[in-house]
Each structure stands twice: as structure tokens, then as C-alpha cells.
Image (spheres, grey):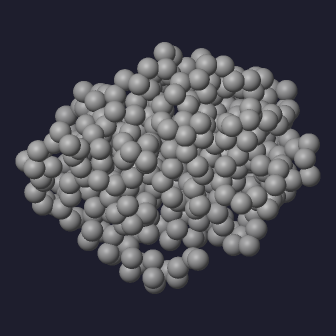
């Protein structure tokens, strides 16, 4: 249920107070001492510009009422912070910051300092974050406003928010936007009751001019950009493709063939999408994928082998532009996006069942180059896996709560 603006502002005030509270201790496992596990209260410093470069990647992990920053190589916890009960994580694209979606908006997490800062891009209902062409794009589901800023500008404006440009959709809806290299804004169309398609706009001074539009994407959701800036959105009857200044509908062969998320590589024209043919299906497990060729303009569903199911958190793109799928059998499967065939399998966690609610912790994947990070709620751990060899290269200490969402501070 959507909260009223007044309720959201009240929760936003509470959030900022909580974000300024002391970091609490996550863990540590049986090997950790009380001294290791203790941390003192301190206010967020927000000294992003003075942060020394991290020696390696940083991974952020949410759990109930908190978020932890882990060293991306050792998976040791660097710092952790109190948050709201459930928050989401988004990579921002500058190698330093992530955005935590909260009731106040998009809150800046400096993974290098580390510091959960008091900088917030305010939003009534913070939604999708998209990074592309050196820009980061935020969508506020509560107002329909798109906010755009230069990705590197946040690091260049310590203690402040960067300059932004905005686009106001005619009506608020659960949407997403992307800005292409030439400045074209491609954004969803809808209202609080339904979503129908997308529009492409170009800005001339303070005015936005429509260059293309499509109403052929019921329940439009998600976005991914493949090679050549081919943008793919999911529909409940296939997908919608935007390329070379025009929209093209990719019709699903099934009467109901919903794609909600696009897993892409910007160096490949091939897209892998999640795929569901049953509008009345209970739970969140899926057993098929949609294979999209943005150059040929085709969409083909492919069924996975028996015993291999996944959720929307379980697919990433990695080495050689292959797709990597975390199945309910506990293994990462290498999936060829050209054929849908599974190749090598790398066992990582124990077999698991799907969540009763999409927000509930369950095994999930995040990726940075050749390394995949696997959330293992059953054991309250995170594992790092080399996607080339299948080797588990690191495992975190046991956490005090189940890891939920993850994001890497990618650059």
C-alpha cells in the first residue's frame, strides 16, 4: 500500500535520524572475539572526498534493519549501519557510491569511506536506478519524476548532491528511465493503475520533444541496454525494443508471456529475460527464460532442465557475455544467451525453495567482472565465486542476520 506524502515525510525524518545513529555489529562467527564484534557509536562523517581508494572492490549487503559493507576480496565486514527494516541497494556506477532506497528517497552509501551519508535524493517512493553513458538515472514511483545526474559528479561534490535535470511524467507510476549517449530520454508510460508502454524524448533547452512512442507494452517493467544502445523493456506479452530512434514490439508466442527483467551486456546484442507463462502462478520461482536478439528483433522462450528454477535475483551476465543462473539446486549454471543451453555448473549453496514474498531473503547473485557474489541466507553468509573456474574464492564470516540484497560499487 502506498503511503501518503505526509507519512513518507515522517518516515524520511526517522530514516535520517537512524542513518545518523551508531553502526551496530553484524557478526562475527565462531572465530570472532568480543573485541572483534564490538563497534562504537559515531555519527556519519560524510567525508567522501577524503576517502582513500579501497584496495579492492566493495560489496554492500542488506539485512533486516541494516546494511553492511564488505571487502570484495576477503568478504570481511568493513563497516555496517542501521537502516529501516527493508531497504534495497543499487550500484551507482562511479566505483565508490551506492544508493540505498528508503522511505525518504535514494540515500547515498559511500562504500569506500565507508559511510552511510546524510545525502538523500528525495523521493516519495524511490524506485529504479539505471546507470548508462556516464549518467545515473533515478525514478520516483510516487511522483513519476525522473532525475538525471553525471555519475562522477557525486564524488566531485563532497557533502552535497550534484546538479540534476528532471523529467516529470504526466502521471505517477512504477516506472523506469534511461538516458542514451545522445541525450535521448527513454521512459515508461503509465499511471497508478496500469502501465502501457514507453516514450523517447529529446531535450531542447527547457523543452522536451517526443521522437517516438509505443503503447504496445502492457505492464511494462524493467530495463536493460544491450550493444548499440538497444534498450529492452519487459511486457506481460513479450518485450519492447527501442533502437535507432524507433520502438519495436517483440511478441511472446504465449498468450501470457511476461518478461519483467532484462539481463544484459553492453557488448552483446543478446539479452536474457526472466519469463513466466502463468498469470496465476503462486510464488516467485521460474523455469523458463526469454532469449532476445536485438539485432534480429526476435524473442524466444526456452525451458530450463527439470530441477533448475530461479528467481529474478538469480541471473547475471559475466565472462564472455554468457549468462549465469543461480538455480534452486544450489548451483550456478552457465547459460548460453544464443541458445538457452546450460553448460558448466558450479555448486555453491545447498538446494533451496522459493520465497513466499519477493522481499524475503533467498539465494541471489551479484557480479563484478569475473566474480559472482552469492547470498546464502540459510547459513547467513556470502560467497565469492570465480565464474571462469567455478572456484569459491572467499566466504564471509557468519552474519547475525540473513543477507538479502547485494550490490557492488562498480565503476
Residue nearer the viewer, 348 or 266: 348
| Residue 193 position (above or below residue 335) | below
Residue nearer the viewer, 314 or 55: 314
| Residue 185 position (above or below residue 13) | above
Residue nearer the viewer, 323 or 309: 309
Residue at the spot x=48%, y=36% of the render? 349
Q: Residue 348's spot in the image, x, y percent?
A: 48, 31
Residue 334 is left or right of residue 34, and the answer is right
Image-quadrant location for residue 395: top left
Residue 46 is left or right of residue 263, and the answer is left
Residue at the spot x=34%, y=55% of the render? 401
How many numbered discs sit on the rendered protein? 0
Q: Quadrant of the N terminus?
A: bottom right
Residue farthest to the left, as pictured: 35
Q: Residue 148's spot in the image, x, y percent?
A: 52, 51
Q: Residue 40's spot in the image, x, y percent?
A: 10, 57
Does residue 238 appear anywhere in the picture? yes
Image-quadrant location for residue 18: bottom left
Residue at the spot x=62%, y=24% of the render? 334
Residue 192 is left or right of residue 28, and the answer is right
Does residue 365 appear anywhere in the picture? no
Q: Quadrant of the C terminus?
A: top left
Q: Residue 393's spot in the image, x, y percent?
A: 37, 23
Residue nearer the viewer, 268 or 77: 77
| Residue 55 position (above or below residue 41) | above
Residue at the spot x=80%, y=45% of the render? 239
Amino acid at each position: 500500500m502506498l503511503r501518503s506524502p505526509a507519512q513518507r515525510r515522517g518516515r524520511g525524518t526517522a530514516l535520517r535520524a537512524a542513518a545518523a545513529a551508531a553502526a551496530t555489529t553484524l557478526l562475527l562467527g565462531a572465530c570472532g572475539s568480543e573485541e572483534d564484534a564490538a563497534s562504537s557509536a559515531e555519527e556519519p562523517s560524510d567525508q567522501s572526498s577524503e576517502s582513500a581508494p579501497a584496495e579492492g572492490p566493495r560489496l554492500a549487503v542488506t539485512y533486516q534493519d541494516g546494511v553492511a559493507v564488505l571487502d570484495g576480496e576477503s568478504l570481511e565486514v568493513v563497516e555496517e549501519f542501521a537502516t529501516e527494516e527493508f531497504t534495497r541497494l543499487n550500484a551507482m556506477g562511479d566505483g565508490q557510491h551506492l544508493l540505498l532506497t528508503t522511505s525518504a528517497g535514494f540515500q547515498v552509501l559511500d562504500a569506500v569511506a565507508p559511510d552511510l551519508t546524510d545525502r538523500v535524493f528525495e523521493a516519495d517512493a524511490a524506485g529504479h536506478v539505471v546507470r548508462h553513458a556516464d549518467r545515473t538515472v533515478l525514478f520516483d514511483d510516487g511522483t513519476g519524476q525522473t532525475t538525471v545526474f553525471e555519475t562522477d559528479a557525486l564524488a566531485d561534490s563532497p557533502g552535497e548532491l550534484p546538479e540534476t535535470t528532471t523529467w516529470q511524467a504526466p502521471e505517477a507510476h512504477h516506472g523506469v528511465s534511461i538516458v542514451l549517449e545522445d541525450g535521448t530520454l527513454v521512459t515508461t508510460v503509465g499511471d497508478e493503475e496500469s502501465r502501457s508502454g514507453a516514450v523517447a524524448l529529446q531535450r531542447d533547452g527547457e523543452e522536451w520533444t517526443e521522437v517516438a512512442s509505443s503503447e504496445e507494452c502492457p505492464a511494462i517493467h524493467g530495463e536493460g541496454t544491450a550493444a548499440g544502445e538497444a534498450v529492452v523493456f519487459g511486457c506481460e506479452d513479450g518485450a519492447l525494443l527501442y533502437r535507432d530512434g524507433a520502438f519495436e514490439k517483440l511478441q511472446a508466442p504465449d498468450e501470457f508471456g511476461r518478461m519483467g527483467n532484462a539481463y544484459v551486456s553492453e557488448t552483446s546484442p543478446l539479452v536474457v529475460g526472466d519469463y513466466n507463462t502463468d498469470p496465476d502462478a503462486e510464488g516467485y520461482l521460474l523455469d523458463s527464460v526469454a532469449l532476445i536478439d536485438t539485432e534480429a528483433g526476435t524473442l524466444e522462450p526456452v525451458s530450463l532442465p527439470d530441477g533448475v528454477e530461479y528467481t529474478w535475483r538469480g541471473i547475471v551476465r559475466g565472462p564472455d557475455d554468457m549468462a549465469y543462473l543461480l538455480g534452486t539446486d544450489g548451483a550456478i549454471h552457465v547459460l548460453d544467451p544464443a541458445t538457452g543451453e546450460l553448460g558448466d555448473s558450479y555448486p555453491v549453496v545447498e538446494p533451496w525453495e522459493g520465497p513466499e514474498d519477493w522481499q524475503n531473503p533467498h539465494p541471489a547473485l551479484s557480479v563484478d567482472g569475473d566474480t559472482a557474489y552469492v547470498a546464502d541466507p540459510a547459513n547467513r553468509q556470502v560467497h565469492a565465486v570465480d565464474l571462469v573456474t567455478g572456484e569459491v574464492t572467499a566466504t564471509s564470516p557468519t552474519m547475525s542476520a540473513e543477507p538479502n540484497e547485494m550490490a557492488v560499487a562498480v565503476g
